[in-house]
């Protein structure tokens, strides 16, 4: 089966579900999510049997990369989408409350379908190797994201987030387009492979200008400084599944295209050092801002937003330390980091959704007394928090470890030092959750109800966090290391 | 492109842009934008990009602007409130773009485009050379090698590129439009039963 | 005869004006229009480059194809954007960005 | 046996968390651990069950456990002893048994894991296992300014370990070693002297924060003072030794780079001894006094390290390493004993303010005796373990002295000797204030009961350890001698 | 002999451990065990003394590859054998005395365990074959002294005195350890028997530094033998039970400093020392201590305090002798002093016991009649201390010191003579007031003679106080202490004069009086208040040490914890809040920041080279 069909399966699935949506009774809409999950699982299986295009098929081979990175990120996107849909299943009460009648699930059906389209877009992004396909795939996911963020159209927060995301997203699209046009102008091509060959002293300024504009929009996509401003507001306002999707799948696809775009430039002897420099600056600033700004946060969702900014900074480190004398390539380290980030962050969002359903609040104070109300959930939360903070023997540590390892080996000392500050601050703000769960007691001492679906997902993810914390080798098998 | 025409259209585009930003009334802004886009379309056409120029007029000035104005009317928007622009915002809004322009100028200056940067006419002979890539009975070939008045069949050429080489992005674009449509429907539909 | 640099300058200027609009204006619709202006300016750059990169005597149509995609994307974006703005207006009776500060910090 | 030593406490903690009988499981596990630990150090064939499992291929990291050399044996013995005492001691607040015992076991497992790892990575990683339990225990069940103290220790340790991590990464990268295994690392060399210096500095700062080297010391005393007794015991007794262990272990790789920081280190360690010594002198509370004293005593171990740096290799100053290791052991045991007894005093009298105490020896002679033993040990009385360590430290400081002018290490040794006077001053003051003099209301015999026999067991165990090592330092020194050559651990088939 | 020597060391330790672990409940049994052990050790030391031949034996206590190791060893020669006899002899008698004296004490077992521990530690010092071992036992006698002074720890004064004793000794040990370390560096060994050889083999060491090392080692002796300015602990140490004062703070432990210096000097050779810089200081310190202490003793009212200052003064004598490079003279005085000072202390103990723990001499009086045996033996002790010519041992040993001083250092000779006068003066003051006249309080009125268990040791000691100075006796039990030929010279005249004058003054002032005629005198006030040294030290400790500690603590909290650490965390939090303030929620603000970010990114990428 040709790799091309992977996205098509997802897409067709989305279309079929969209059709089915029209005929389903309001109470039955959640079957759409189950079906969507089924489709995605099927696609995930197909991923292992997909074959590359023949060399002669130029229309496709120009735009569609099929390498280990593409495979990994397609799988990543699929898994992230599956988890998002699982999260959405348990979130649908709240979703329907702000879309239609809280008693019916009318109006939630499209929500599941949209994830399939966004997923397809991200899978295309994973394969994008030409600025044109990169652009269109990126826009597909971005525009889908606008809808997903503003989906709760009776919720002011969701709409406000939607508008902010829209305006800033469009702004970043403007810069992306402008940047692409300069790169095109300098080299006469949009094919990344060819661009690398055409760099010379004459056009290097054009290229750097174009690249910096593209970097801006990529920074927007992954939530890096200085384009991080949308992240906290949008994450907070958006429906939780959307937030999870944005913070994991969307960020990952941002990085995958970042890796592809940056590669020809950073490996060039002429301008490579400049690219490394700007990336190191961005990494350092992002780490610092994400971690420090998280300190005063009171809302867990917002905290996760800043945490996601901080993580973007940590992921930028290995990119800035491009393949210098390491056993692993930057792409592999980024993939590794993201794989672990997926596990821990999704777990955090699942926990958040559980808490939110009980208390109706995303605040850290909502965690108070969790140690008493649901000890098992509390201890799993503690594990996840430890992983987010990057404690050794949890999976979360390995990502930071490899990132720091690359940065230290490459001698990026200032970002590394800022990384120290960031990690230390990270302990502070993450541990606030632990403090809330155990030190504080809640007014409501009644046991907490956790829906079995969420509970088992959280169990699985926490178990993975611990197992991979001691034995991370399996992730290597996935990223082909 | 003749210099005079260039400056005329350029002036039109930029004036339109400035008015767009400066006018207080959204409708005026929208109309200023149409003005700007007309200027842009002129520049496109001057660059032998007839198709793009026309599309610019049709899609932007026609469809998109109409949509904008329609929404403005629908929402019955008034002028922005008298306590208008905060001076700091305005200052930032002037200085930042100005600095951006300076930077762009710096980039432009950095590299003497020389021969390549000079405007070269598209001659019949050059068109004839290019025509060889296309089958002889194709419209493009015919148009390029038209014995009397060879014309640049840019619509055909773009169409050719889009449907052959750019087939894959075009498919993605189709999905994009589908999603956008869906989105508009979702976001603007009223619930069947009003939430209590 | 206008040179490439002049086109680039004009497009840059337009792009900057668009950015100014985004920064200065508070009406979301106008901000949105300014964003469209920025996209259009980028298109101008592309077309100019495409025209000046003569490819065997003809303009390089890759650039113009890209402009086509930009316009399509812009149209889609406008559609979705305006839908969100309308929904927002329904919920909040405002399209002023200064009123959208319930989430901050 | 090594894997057992780590698995037993971890599994016990998990069993407790999932609803087992907390106290008995914990006691059983700790006792079993103690038997296996001491047994494998002193009599069993300890290479049994050493194992090595590659958990990551690039960089090549192994979960490798075993006794690398005598130093790790001694540290394991220390950890097992203190863990057992910690489990047995302290009084768990009602309703928190699960947290209390599982936290202790986790912290203990972290310490054991670090000392048993023969891979640099897991050596580092196991240490962090203690972080969350510590945070919870201090923050929830501590006393006094517990919240602030919990935050402080957490942030400090986190910052210290991340700096350390950078140093370790750099170390491995610069060494060109294929794996993170100690044996491979120590077999390789770092040629670049700039890198050596940088790594050495990072190691000194990173480990230094964990050891509460001046000026990174302000977390330790409040944390120990606020922590529940078992946590204070394990932290001050075991985990603090992690940093020193690491410095000594990695020293041969950066011997040259360390030279550059010798004078800085000497200044800092003297600050640890004298500056913190004076700070200790001014403490008004028993627990704070002990906390600061444990910071101060780290200076002596650093002194041995400084002597080692000056000499340039283990062979050039054969005293330094045994001195440091012996003192680490001795300090660990004695401070654990003292923290444990301080907690007992707190529980029996309700206060640890020195001004409110007095005459406790009448009502609680056994407590007074054991505390006195601990206090005497900590001020370096001969016959107790600390003296053997301290005297060797001082000898190591003068090992290079040939009768000519005094070198900086010798001057430092002389100044450090004044610290012995200071520590005697504050220890005896505190002892006199607590146990001697006429009894006051809440310390008279109608109010306070002496140690029960059951509570005495852990304290007596530690006291015996102090005496045995104090009277026969060869019991530990022979371990160091026997195993200068690292025992090769079997590579598991990959 | 070898195992006997080890037994000599081990037996007291064994009894201490047995008492502490097993016999705490059985108080009387404990007492008997300790006494028996002291008796057996006395027997052993007599056997050793009579046996021929010196030997050294040792094992490696802390062995480290590449290092000679720390050895625990015994060096038996005439010096240590003689000293052993003193220690075990006085020790055994004090044990006997204590059986009665401490009969009704509640913590008798603890007391005897402490005594046994002391016997062990003291034996260790005496037999030590090297400096490290000596230091170990040096510290251990400090511990046992601490425990015994603080025996009645619920008394504030006792607890404070114990602490003071330990800490003052620690200051001395600070120097001692430095000295040991430096000497190790110079001579390359700790072992006494190898010191001279090591020093000869070593080259390139600095004479100055060796002198400093010697002085540092002497600092240890200053602490232990309570030499000025570290003398302040000894008078306070009288808070302990009186037999303890007799054994530890008069006869043996405080003499350990002298013994150590003698051991050191004889090992290294006095000729080496002679060449060194600054060693005269030692003699001067001894002289000054003896003078100051004698002056202070003249105005004390507490019987034990008077004896304590007299001990100080006599220790000063010994140190002076050692400092004048005549360790034998010092050791000889140590040997005679041990007997008569133990006698005096035990006598005072008997008095105190009889007077129901009354220690003020002005509340005694007329004990001559009620306590005749004590009266006689105490009188003998007094005479011996004053150095009554020819018939007391004190005369012979003091004579030697005065002789040495006359030969080597005239100013010190004058001081020594003055001290001899003062000694007679204050001792007879004590004697007259306490024993003669009529009783001045009810307690002394009802005093009864003590039982045989207490007066037997007194009698034995009285005999020794008389005869131990004769060369025939000393030749047997302390052969190593060289006895100079006696001849009538300036030293004899000075000492004779001192005794006569001292007696006359004392008789005139105190023979028939109920209150001190000198009490109001200003100079006497200074003496009574011990030259205000304790007050001065208290001030130094309060303002110097504790003030500095408070300041540093404050600084530590303020600067390191507050400003630097706190500053960092506040800065981090502040920056964090600043960042969140940028997150104003306002899109215009975001766009502005976005724009600035764009400018910066472009600038850095394109224009920064």
Image: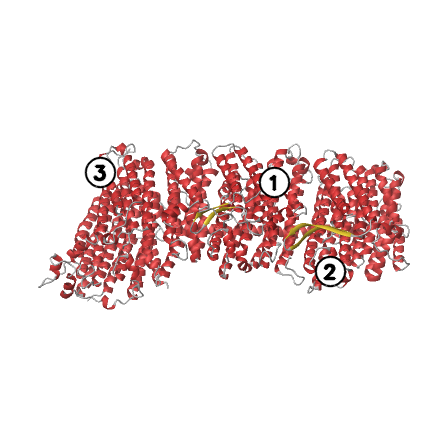
Asked if marks 1 and 2 touch (Cβ < 8 Å), the reply is: no
- Same chain assignment for discs 1 and 2: no
Please rate how many residues cluster around mark 2, counting C-alpha atoms within 10 Å: few if below 14, some from 14 to 19, many from 20.
some
Please rate how many residues cluster around mark 1, counting C-alpha atoms within 10 Å: few if below 14, some from 14 to 19, many from 20.
many
Number of the front mark, 2 or 3: 2
Can you tell which quarter of the image residue A321 is in? bottom left
- Letter of the chain that mark 3 sits on in the rendering: A
- Letter of the chain that mark 1 sits on in the rendering: D
- In which quadrant is the C terminus of chain E drawn? bottom left
**What residue is drawn where x is 24% and y is 47%?**
B176
- Letter of the chain that mark 2 sits on in the rendering: E
Task: Give percent across and percent down for residue C79.
Answer: 23, 46
Q: Taking C90 as reference, is D463 left or right?
A: right
**Does residue E605 show up?**
yes
Task: Give percent across and percent down for residue B194.
Answer: 26, 34
The residue tagged with tag 1: helix, strand or loop?
A: helix
Task: Give percent across and percent down for residue E96.
Answer: 81, 39
Can you tell which quarter of the image residue E199 is in? bottom right
Q: Which mark is residue A19?
A: 3
- Same chain assignment for discs 1 and 3: no
The residue tagged with tag 2: helix, strand or loop?
A: helix
**What residue is drawn where x is 80% and y is 50%?**
E81
Inter-mark Cα distance, 1 to 3? 73 Å
Residue at the disc numbered 2: E197
The residue tagged with tag 3: helix, strand or loop?
A: helix
Residue at the disc numbered 1: D342
């Amino acid at each position: 089966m040709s790799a091309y069909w992977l996205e098509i399966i997802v897409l067709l699935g989305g279309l079929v579900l969209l059709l089915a949506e029209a005929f389903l009774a309001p109470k039955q809409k959640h079957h759409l999510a189950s079906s969507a999950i089924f489709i995605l699982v099927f696609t995930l299986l197909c991923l292992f049997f997909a074959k590359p295009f023949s060399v002669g098929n130029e229309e496709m081979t120009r735009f569609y990369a099929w390498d280990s990175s593409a495979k990994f990120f397609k799988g990543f996107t699929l898994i992230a989408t599956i988890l998002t849909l699982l999260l959405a299943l348990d979130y649908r009460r709240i979703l329907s409350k702000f879309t239609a009648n809280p008693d019916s699930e009318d109006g939630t059906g499209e929500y599941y379908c949209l994830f399939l389209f966004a997923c397809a877009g991200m899978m295309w992004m994973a394969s994008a190797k030409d600025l044109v396909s990169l652009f269109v795939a990126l826009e597909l996911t971005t525009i889908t994201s606008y809808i997903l963020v503003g989906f709760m159209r009776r919720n002011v927060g969701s709409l406000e987030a939607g508008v902010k995301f829209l305006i800033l997203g469009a702004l970043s699209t403007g810069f992306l387009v402008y940047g692409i046009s300069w790169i095109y102008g300098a080299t006469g091509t949009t094919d990344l492979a060819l661009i690398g060959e055409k760099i010379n002293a004459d056009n290097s300024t054009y290229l750097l200008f174009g690249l910096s504009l593209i970097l801006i929009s990529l920074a927007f996509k992954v939530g890096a400084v200085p384009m991080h401003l949308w992240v906290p507001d949008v994450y907070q306002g958006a429906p939780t599944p959307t937030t999870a999707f944005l913070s994991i799948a969307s960020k990952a696809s941002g990085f995958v295209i970042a890796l592809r775009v940056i590669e020809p430039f950073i490996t060039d002897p002429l301008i490579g050092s400049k690219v490394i420099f700007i990336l190191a600056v961005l990494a350092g600033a992002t780490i610092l801002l994400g971690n420090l700004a998280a300190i005063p946060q009171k809302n867990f969702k917002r905290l996760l937003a800043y945490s996601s900014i901080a993580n973007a900074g940590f992921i930028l480190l290995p990119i800035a330390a491009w393949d210098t004398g390491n056993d692993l390539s930057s792409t592999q380290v980024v993939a590794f980091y993201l794989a672990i980030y997926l596990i821990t962050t999704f777990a955090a969002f699942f926990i958040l959704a559980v808490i939110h359903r009980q208390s109706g609040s995303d605040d850290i104070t909502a965690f108070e007394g969790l140690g008493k109300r649901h000890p098992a959930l509390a201890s799993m939360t503690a594990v996840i928090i430890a992983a987010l903070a990057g404690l050794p023997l949890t999976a979360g540590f390995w990502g930071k470890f490899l990132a720091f390892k690359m940065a230290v080996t490459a001698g990026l000392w200032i970002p590394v030092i800022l990384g120290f500050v960031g990690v230390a601050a990270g302990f502070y703000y993450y541990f606030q959750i632990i403090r809330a769960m155990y030190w504080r007691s809640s007014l409501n001492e009644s046991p907490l109800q956790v829906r079995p679906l969420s509970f088992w997902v959280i169990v699985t993810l926490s178990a993975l966090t611990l197992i991979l914390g001691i034995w991370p080798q399996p992730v290597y098998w996935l990223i082909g290391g | 492109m003749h210099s005079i025409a260039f400056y005329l259209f350029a002036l039109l585009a930029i004036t339109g842009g400035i008015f767009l930003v400066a006018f207080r009334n959204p409708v005026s802004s929208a109309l200023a934008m149409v003005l700007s886009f007309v200027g842009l379309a002129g520049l496109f056409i001057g660059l032998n990009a007839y198709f793009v120029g026309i599309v610019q007029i049709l899609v932007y000035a026609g469809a998109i602007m109409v949509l904008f104005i329609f929404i403005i009317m629908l929402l019955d928007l008034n002028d922005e409130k008298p306590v208008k622009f905060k001076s700091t915002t305005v200052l930032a809004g002037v200085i930042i773009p100005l600095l951006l322009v300076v930077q762009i100028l710096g980039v432009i200056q950095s590299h003497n485009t020389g021969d390549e940067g000079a405007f070269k006419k598209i001659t019949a002979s050059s068109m004839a050379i290019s025509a060889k890539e296309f089958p002889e009975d194709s419209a493009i070939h015919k148009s390029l090698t038209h014995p009397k008045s060879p014309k640049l069949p840019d619509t055909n050429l773009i169409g050719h590129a889009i449907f052959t080489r750019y087939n894959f992005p075009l498919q993605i674009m189709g999905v994009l439009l589908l999603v956008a449509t869906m989105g508009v429907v979702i976001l603007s539909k009223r619930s069947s039963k009003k939430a209590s | 005869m206008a040179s490439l640099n002049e086109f680039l300058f004009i497009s840059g200027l337009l792009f900057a004006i668009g950015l100014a609009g985004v920064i200065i204006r508070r009406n979301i619709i106008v901000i949105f229009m300014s964003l469209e202006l920025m996209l259009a300016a980028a298109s101008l750059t592309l077309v100019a480059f495409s025209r000046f990169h003569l490819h065997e005597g003809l303009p390089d149509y890759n650039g113009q194809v890209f402009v086509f995609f930009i316009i399509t994307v812009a149209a889609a974006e406008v559609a979705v954007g305006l839908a969100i703005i309308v929904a927002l207006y329904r919920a909040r009776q405002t399209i002023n960005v200064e009123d959208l500060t319930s989430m901050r910090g | 046996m090594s894997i057992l030593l780590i698995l037993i406490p971890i599994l016990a903690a998990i069993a407790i968390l999932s609803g087992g009988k907390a106290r008995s499981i914990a006691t059983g596990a700790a006792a079993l651990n103690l038997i296996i630990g001491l047994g494998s150090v002193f009599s069993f064939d300890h290479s049994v069950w050493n194992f090595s499992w590659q958990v990551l291929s690039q960089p090549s990291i192994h979960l490798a456990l075993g006794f690398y050399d005598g130093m790790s044996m001694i540290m394991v013995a220390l950890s097992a002893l203190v863990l057992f005492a910690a489990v047995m001691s302290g009084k768990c607040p009602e309703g928190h048994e699960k947290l209390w015992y599982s936290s202790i076991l986790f912290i203990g497992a972290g310490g054991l894991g670090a000392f048993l790892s023969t891979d640099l990575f897991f050596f580092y990683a196991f240490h962090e296992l203690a972080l969350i339990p510590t945070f919870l225990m201090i923050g929830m069940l501590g006393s006094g300014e517990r919240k602030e103290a919990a935050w402080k220790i957490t942030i400090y340790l986190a910052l210290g370990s991340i700096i350390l991590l950078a140093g370790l990464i750099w170390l491995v990268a610069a060494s060109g070693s294929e794996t993170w295994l100690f044996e491979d690392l120590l077999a390789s060399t770092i040629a670049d002297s700039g890198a050596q210096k940088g790594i050495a500095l990072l190691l000194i700062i990173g480990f230094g924060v964990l050891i509460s080297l001046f000026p990174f010391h302000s977390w330790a005393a409040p944390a120990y003072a606020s922590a529940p007794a078992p946590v204070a015991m394990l932290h001050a007794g075991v985990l603090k030794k992690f940093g020193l262990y690491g410095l000594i272990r990695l020293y041969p790789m950066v011997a040259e780079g360390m030279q550059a920081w010798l004078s800085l280190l000497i200044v800092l360690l003297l600050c640890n001894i004298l500056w913190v010594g004076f700070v200790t002198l001014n403490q008004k509370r028993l627990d704070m006094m002990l906390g600061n004293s444990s910071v101060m005593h780290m200076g002596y171990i650093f002194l041995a390290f400084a002597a080692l740096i000056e000499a340039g290799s283990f062979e050039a100053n054969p005293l330094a390493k045994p001195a440091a290791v012996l003192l680490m052991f001795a300090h660990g045991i004695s401070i654990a004993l003292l923290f444990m007894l301080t907690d007992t005093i707190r529980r029996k009298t309700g206060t640890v303010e020195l001004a409110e105490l007095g005459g406790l020896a009448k009502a609680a002679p056994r407590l007074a005796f054991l505390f006195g033993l601990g206090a005497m040990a900590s001020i370096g009385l001969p016959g107790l373990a600390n003296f053997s360590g301290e005297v060797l430290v001082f000898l190591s400081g003068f090992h290079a002295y040939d009768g000519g002018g005094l070198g900086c290490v010798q001057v430092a040794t002389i100044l450090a000797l004044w610290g012995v006077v200071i520590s005697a001053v504050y220890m005896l003051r505190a002892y006199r204030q607590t146990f001697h003099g006429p009894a006051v209301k809440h310390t008279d015999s109608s109010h306070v009961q002496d140690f029960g026999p059951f509570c005495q067991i852990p304290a007596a165990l530690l006291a015996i350890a102090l005496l045995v090592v104090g009277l026969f330092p060869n019991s530990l020194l022979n371990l160091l001698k026997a195993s200068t050559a690292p025992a090769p651990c079997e590579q598991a088939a990959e | 002999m070898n195992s006997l020597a080890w037994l000599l060391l081990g037996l007291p330790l064994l009894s201490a451990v047995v008492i502490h672990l097993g016999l705490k409940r059985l108080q009387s049994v404990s007492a008997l065990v300790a006494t028996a052990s002291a008796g057996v050790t006395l027997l052993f030391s007599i056997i050793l003394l009579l046996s021929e031949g010196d030997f050294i034996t040792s094992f490696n206590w802390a062995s480290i590859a590449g290092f000679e190791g720390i050895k625990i060893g015994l060096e038996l020669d005439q010096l240590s054998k003689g000293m052993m006899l003193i220690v075990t002899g006085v020790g055994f008698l004090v044990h006997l005395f204590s059986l009665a004296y401490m009969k009704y004490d509640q913590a008798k077992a603890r007391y005897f365990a402490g005594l046994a521990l002391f016997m062990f530690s003291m034996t260790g010092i005496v037999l030590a074959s090297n400096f490290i071992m000596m230091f170990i036992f040096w510290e251990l006698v400090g511990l046992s002294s601490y425990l015994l002074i603080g025996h009645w720890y619920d008394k504030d004064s006792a607890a404070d005195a114990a602490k003071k004793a330990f800490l003052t000794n620690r200051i001395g040990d600070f120097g001692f350890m430095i000295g040991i370390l430096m000497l190790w560096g110079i001579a390359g060994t700790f072992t006494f028997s190898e010191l001279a050889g090591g020093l000869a083999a070593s080259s390139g060491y600095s004479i100055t530094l060796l002198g400093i090392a010697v002085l540092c080692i002497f600092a240890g002796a200053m602490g232990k033998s309570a030499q000025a300015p570290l003398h302040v602990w000894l008078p306070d140490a009288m808070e302990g039970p009186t037999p303890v004062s007799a054994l530890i703070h008069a006869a043996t432990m405080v003499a350990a400093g002298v013994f150590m210096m003698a051991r050191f000097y004889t090992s290294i050779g006095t000729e080496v020392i002679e060449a060194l810089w600054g060693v005269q200081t030692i003699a001067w310190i001894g002289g000054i201590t003896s003078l100051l202490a004698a002056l202070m003793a003249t105005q004390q009212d507490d019987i034990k305090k008077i004896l304590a200052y007299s001990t100080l003064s006599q220790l000063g004598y010994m140190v002076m002798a050692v400092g004048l490079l005549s360790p034998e003279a010092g050791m000889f005085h140590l040997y005679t002093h041990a007997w008569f000072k133990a006698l005096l202390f035990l006598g005072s103990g008997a008095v105190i016991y009889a007077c129901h723990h009354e220690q003020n001499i002005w509340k005694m009086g007329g004990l001559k009649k009620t306590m005749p045996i004590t009266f006689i033996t105490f009188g003998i002790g007094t005479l011996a201390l004053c150095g009554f010519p020819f018939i007391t041992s004190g005369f012979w040993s003091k004579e030697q010191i005065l002789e040495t001083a006359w030969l080597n250092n005239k100013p010190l000779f004058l001081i020594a003579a003055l001290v001899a006068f003062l000694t007679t003066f204050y001792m007879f003051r004590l004697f007259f007031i306490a024993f003669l006249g009529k009783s001045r309080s009810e307690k002394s009125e009802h005093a009864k003679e003590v039982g045989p268990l207490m007066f037997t040791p007194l009698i034995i000691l009285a005999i020794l106080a008389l005869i131990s100075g004769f060369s025939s006796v000393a030749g047997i039990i302390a052969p190593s202490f060289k006895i100079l030929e006696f001849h009538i010279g300036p030293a004899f005249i000075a000492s004779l004069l001192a005794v006569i004058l001292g007696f006359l003054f004392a008789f005139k002032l105190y023979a028939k009086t109920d209150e001190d005629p000198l009490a109001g005198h200003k100079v006497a006030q200074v003496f009574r208040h011990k030259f205000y040294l304790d007050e001065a030290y208290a001030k130094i400790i309060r303002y110097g040490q504790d003030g500095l500690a408070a300041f540093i603590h404050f600084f530590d909290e303020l600067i390191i914890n507050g400003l630097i650490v706190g500053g960092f965390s506040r800065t981090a939090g502040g920056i964090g809040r600043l960042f969140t303030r940028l997150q104003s929620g306002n899109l215009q603000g975001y766009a502005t920041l976005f724009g600035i970010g764009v400018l910066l990114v472009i600038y850095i990428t394109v224009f920064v080279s």
